C-alpha cells in the first residue's frame, strides 16, 4: 500500500471563553476529514513561528486555513486600516513563517480563504480591505445562507493549473469573506474570478504546487472541490 502523505493544516486561535477559560486552538472537523478522504494524513500545526522549519521537516504539504480575521495591512504596504479589519498577529506571524519556508522548499501549498490572501501577501501581492467599500454592486461575499451551501459561481481561467485540476469552466462555491486579493503580484496569476470581478483564486506557475482559493473546498460543494484536495495530496505523494 502506498504511504499516505502527511498534510499539515494551520490552526485557528481563540481567546479564553467558550471551549476553555484559557487560550485555545481550533479547526473544523471537515478540514481534517476532507484531507483524509483525499488520501492524506492530516496533522494540525500550531502557531510557533520559531518551529516552522521543524514542522516543515515532518510534513509533505501545507494547507493554510481560513478564519474570521484579517492580514495586517502593514504587511502589504497599506498605511491605513479599515474599521472592519481584525487581526490575529500571532497566527499570521506563524503562518507567514510556514508559508515562506514551504515555498522556499517548493513544498505543495494550498491557501484556503484567508490562507489564499496570506499566500498572495507572502508573494508580494496586496488586498482589498473591505469589498463593500470598494466594489460597486459587489456580490454578497459573506453569503447569508449556510456555509455548506453555494453562494455564487466563479469562472475558472483557461490554461491555469486550477482549470486542469477541476476540468470545468466554472464552479459553484461558498463565500465567507469581506476581503480579497487586489493585486496578486508578479509571482502569482489569477485562476478564478467572481461575476463582480473579485479575484477568487491565484496560483504560481513557478512552484510545483502552489494554489490559493477564496472559497472553502473542504465543504465539497462542487465536484471540483474534491479534485483540488486530491491534487494537493497527489502533489505531496
Image (spheres, rainbow, N blue to C red):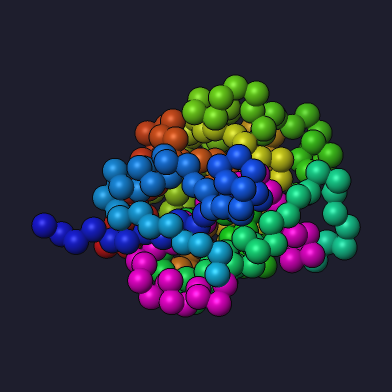
The picture places residue 23, in percent across and down from the top left corner, at 61, 54
Whether residue 201 is visible, yes or no, is no
| Residue 218, quarter of picture | top left
Q: What residue is at 78 percent from the left and 48 percent from the top?
A: 85
Q: Which quarter shows the N terminus?
A: bottom left
**Residue 59 lies within the magenta run:** yes
- From the viewer's side, name the closer residue of 192 and 60: 60
Total labels: the figure holds: 0
Q: Residue furthest right?
A: 80
Q: What residue is at 56 percent from the left and 42 percent from the top?
A: 19
**Residue 5 lies within the magenta run:** no
Looking at the image, residue 78 sits to the left or right of residue 66; the answer is right
| Span highlighted in magenta in the image | 49-76
| Residue 234, quarter of picture | bottom left
Instruction: Using the image, determine if residue 92 lies above or below residue 230.
Output: below
- From the viewer's side, name the closer residue of 167 and 81: 81
Q: Residue furthest front?
A: 21
Instruction: Using the image, determine if residue 221 lies above or below residue 94.
Output: above
- From the viewer's side, name the closer residue of 232 and 23: 23
Instruction: Using the image, determine if residue 62 lies above or below residue 106.
Output: above
Q: Residue furthest left?
A: 1
The picture places residue 152, in percent across and down from the top left corner, at 58, 28
Looking at the image, residue 25 sits to the left or right of residue 168; the answer is right
- From the viewer's side, name the closer residue of 6 and 175: 6
Q: What residue is at 50 percent from the left and 75 percent from the top?
A: 51
Whether residue 139 is visible, yes or no, is yes
The picture places residue 144, in percent across and down from the top left corner, at 65, 23
Q: What residue is at 35 percent from the left and 54 percent from the top?
A: 42
Q: Which quarter shows the C terminus?
A: bottom left
Amino acid at each position: 500500500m502506498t504511504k499516505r502523505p502527511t498534510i499539515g493544516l494551520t490552526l485557528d486561535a481563540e481567546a479564553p471563553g467558550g471551549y476553555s477559560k484559557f487560550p485555545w486552538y481550533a479547526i473544523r472537523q471537515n478540514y481534517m476529514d476532507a484531507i483524509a478522504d483525499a488520501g492524506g494524513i492530516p496533522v494540525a500545526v500550531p502557531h510557533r513561528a520559531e518551529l516552522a522549519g521543524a514542522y516543515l521537516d515532518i510534513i509533505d504539504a501545507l494547507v493554510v486555513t481560513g478564519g474570521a480575521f484579517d492580514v495586517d495591512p502593514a504587511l502589504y504596504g497599506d498605511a491605513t486600516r479599515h474599521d472592519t479589519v481584525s487581526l490575529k498577529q500571532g497566527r499570521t506571524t506563524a503562518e507567514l513563517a510556514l508559508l515562506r519556508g514551504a515555498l522556499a522548499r517548493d513544498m505543495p501549498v494550498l491557501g484556503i480563504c484567508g490562507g489564499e490572501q496570506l499566500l498572495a501577501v507572502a508573494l508580494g501581492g496586496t488586498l482589498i480591505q473591505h469589498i463593500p467599500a470598494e466594489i460597486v454592486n459587489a456580490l454578497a461575499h459573506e453569503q447569508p445562507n449556510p456555509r455548506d451551501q453555494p453562494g455564487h459561481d466563479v469562472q475558472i481561467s483557461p490554461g491555469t493549473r486550477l482549470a486542469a485540476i477541476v476540468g470545468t469552466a466554472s464552479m459553484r462555491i461558498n463565500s465567507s469573506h469581506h476581503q480579497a486579493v487586489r493585486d496578486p503580484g508578479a509571482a502569482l496569476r489569477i485562476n478564478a474570478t467572481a461575476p463582480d470581478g473579485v479575484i477568487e483564486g491565484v496560483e504560481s506557475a513557478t512552484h510545483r504546487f502552489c494554489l490559493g482559493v477564496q472559497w472553502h473546498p473542504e465543504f465539497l460543494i462542487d465536484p471540483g472541490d474534491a479534485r483540488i484536495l486530491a491534487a494537493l495530496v497527489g502533489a505531496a505523494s
